Image: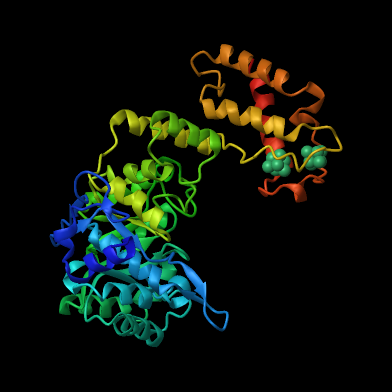
Amino acid sequence: MDRRQFIKTTAAGAASAALASCGVKGGKPQSEGTMEMRTNPINGDKVSLLGYGCMRWQMIKDEEGRDIIDQDSVDELVDMAIASGVNYFDTSPAYLQGQSEKASAAALNRHPRNSYFLATKLSNFRNWSREASMKMYYDSFDVMETDYIDYYLLHNIGRGGFEAFSRRYIENGMMDFLLAQREKGKIRQLGFSFHGSQPEFDAMLATHDTYKYDFVQIQLNYVDWKHADGVRNVNADYLYDKITALGLPIVVMEPLQGGALANLPRSIAQQLKERDPDASAASWAMRFVGTHPGVLTVLSGMTYQEHLEDNLSTFTGFKPLSEAELDFLERLATTMKEYPTVNCTACNYCMPCPWGVDIPGTFQHYNRAVGEGDFPQNPQQKDFARLRRRYLLSYDRAVESLRQASHCIGCKECLTHCPQSINIPAELHRIDRYIEKIRREG
Ligand code: SF4
Ligand code: SF4
């Protein structure tokens, strides 16, 4: 029996609970243990710590050249996920040009309805009239052929401020309607997903007294834990503390920061590999999120089987991070935020620079120093004088003085040649400012 047959056979008849311990990988046992489960403190649901984000299904072209979801691959991935203990699936009428709900439900409806939790959203960002919002709500039930939704979200709260929330849900009466639907059991749990700044989050959480949310969905990962930009999102440690203080469970989105934490700069990835050669960069990020006990489930948009397999190996027989590992990730996050490395592959396509700048040499030297983590940052740093001297000497050795970043005049001739789309003059000037600061601080 090949892997496809295996998955179809296991998925066809078996309830997920019976299969939760198999940790399927290519039809073979993959990891020791079972899928990590969390208990929803509001209603007692047993939810898998790995949840499926249904916003990145594989797309193919139909006969008329239109983009459609590859239903076969969705069926296969959903079967494999359920067979491995995943029981939370999150979609929206807005995902994948409106196709996600249908494709996800088509795969899920081949399994008993009580073997998984279905999450979807009122994604009425473009048209928040009552009529359009009601239609969107009822369409979700029709499209997904279900008569209840387990986890229903007010989608993308924060964008447009509290006024947008008020327009989309209060003034059109949708909030009262959704609360009544929860009373009737059509919605089992009602929550919201948040993207915004702290004042908007605080204002939204203040409405909990009135609406009694059941859960909140936030962006949480080891960089945004303490280093969010504060505009599009808030430090996740702040959000986490506020939400858990209300006794609400947290659904996590963007555990990989939109994929960035799976595709790290080489120097950072190298540090992770040195610490654990067998662990993927994504698994570090996933373990960080799962280590927090207030997290109910971690959504991951797994397009391909290898993404699912990697996550299954993380969440099956789940191992929380130790304090030392948490510190290690925080150091990496600080470095990534304060001293972002340049994604230069040293291909040399930008060379020669008419002004003689050694572009790849400068980037390589800077990346190496940041990647090794042992570079001068400020005079308060232990051993700053030695690190400073060593850094400046090694820079002079790696890049001749007449070819250093300070000689870039910003003519931009190199820009169009870079396959990595690096803003070369901006990065050179940033590195030069850093070096000048280090020189002055001597
Ligand atoms: S922008 Fe700077 S690095 Fe690029 S070609 Fe001009 S001088 Fe050289
Ligand atoms: S073209 Fe881009 S990637 Fe290649 S060496 Fe220049 S900066 Fe680096």
Q: Position of residue 266 (x, y in %)?
A: 54, 37
> Residue shown at 70%/22% (left/top)?
398
**Which residue is at 82% across, 37% downward?**
352
In the foreground, 69 or 416? 69
Quick one: quadrant of the N terminus? bottom left
Say above or below: 18 vs 390.
below
Picture coordinates of residue 39, whole percent (x, y) = 16, 55
Residue at image location 16% in from the left, 66% down from the top: 15
On screen, residue 148 versus residue 133, left or right, reads left
Instruction: Look at the image and tell me whether residue 426 can be seen.
Output: no
- Please say if 127 is above or below 49: below
Coloring scheme used: rainbow
Left or right of 399? Residue 241 is left
Quadrant containing ligand 2 reads top right
- Residue under the point 80% across and 31% down: 407
Quadrant including the C terminus: top right
Vertical position of residue 66 compared to residue 407: above or below: below
**Residue 165 appears at what percent x and percent y?**
39, 69
Residue farthest toward the right in the current orientation of the protein: 354
